[in-house]
Image (cartoon, rainbow, N blue to C red):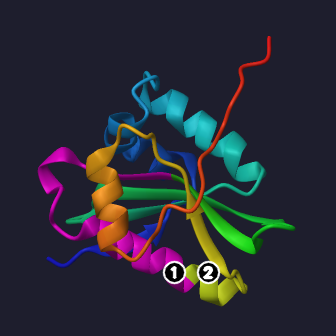
Amino acid sequence: MSPDIREVENEVEAATCFPVMRLLRPDLTSASQFAALWHRLAKGGYRLFALLVDGEPRALAGFRIGENIVHGRYIYVDDLVTSEAERGSGYGAALLERLRQECRALGCGKLLLDTPMANVRGHRFYYRNGMFATALRFTEEIR
């Protein structure tokens, strides 16, 4: 069966995405915790695409729409992950293409994301898929 990309629309669907999302976000502890977090984030504009095979999530793309002076209107990708067994299957590339379609449909001129400096495999994936490193992000924890 070919993959199907659908937007997650409720907490039940979000909970089914937990095993895949936990690969990227290991601090998540349960499906119910993730579903509640998805619900809170969705109120602020967070959206989640799930790539399904036989009805099961195999890859995810969490994103939000933003606008600022530097980038104009854009989609920021918070989360992009494929299940370990499915890596190399083209599912990540399919989600990036779906995000590009969403950019065009929403009048966004850029697709942005951050990835850790140590994520060399991820860097190669993004370069192969037409994305370029254009900045470094500096952070400071405020307590």
Q: Is residue 135 above or below residue 84?
A: below
Q: Which residue is drawn at 65% across and 44% down?
A: 39
Q: Does the magenta-highlighted stretch encompass residue 48?
A: no
* Residue 14 appears in view: yes
Residue 73, percent from left and from top: 77, 75
**What label sits on residue 40 in the rendered view?**
none
Residue 134 vs residue 80, the one in the foreground: 134
> Mostly what secondary structure, the magenta segment?
helix
Would you identify the image quadrant in which residue 69 lies?
bottom right
Badge 2 marks a residue whose secondary structure is: helix
Looking at the rendered structure, which numbered label has been put on residue 100?
A: 1
Rounded to the nearest whole Å, what is the CA distance between mark 2 and mark 1? 5 Å
Q: Within 10 angstroms of label 1, few (less than 14), some, or many (20 or more) residues?
A: some
Q: Residue 93's x, y, as percent? A: 32, 72
Q: Which of 54 and 72 is in front in this view?
A: 72
Any part of residue 51 in sight: no
Q: For the magenta stretch, what is the residue range?
A: 79-101
- Residue 45 position, x and y percent, is 73, 57
Numbered circles on residues, count = 2
What amino acid does circle 2 point to?
Cys
Q: Is residue 76 left or right of residue 86?
A: right
Q: In which quarter of the image is the N terminus?
A: bottom left
Discs 2, 1 touching: Cβ within 8 Å = yes
Please tell me how crowded label 2 is: few (under 14), some (14-19), or many (20+) other residues with Cα within 10 Å. Answer: some
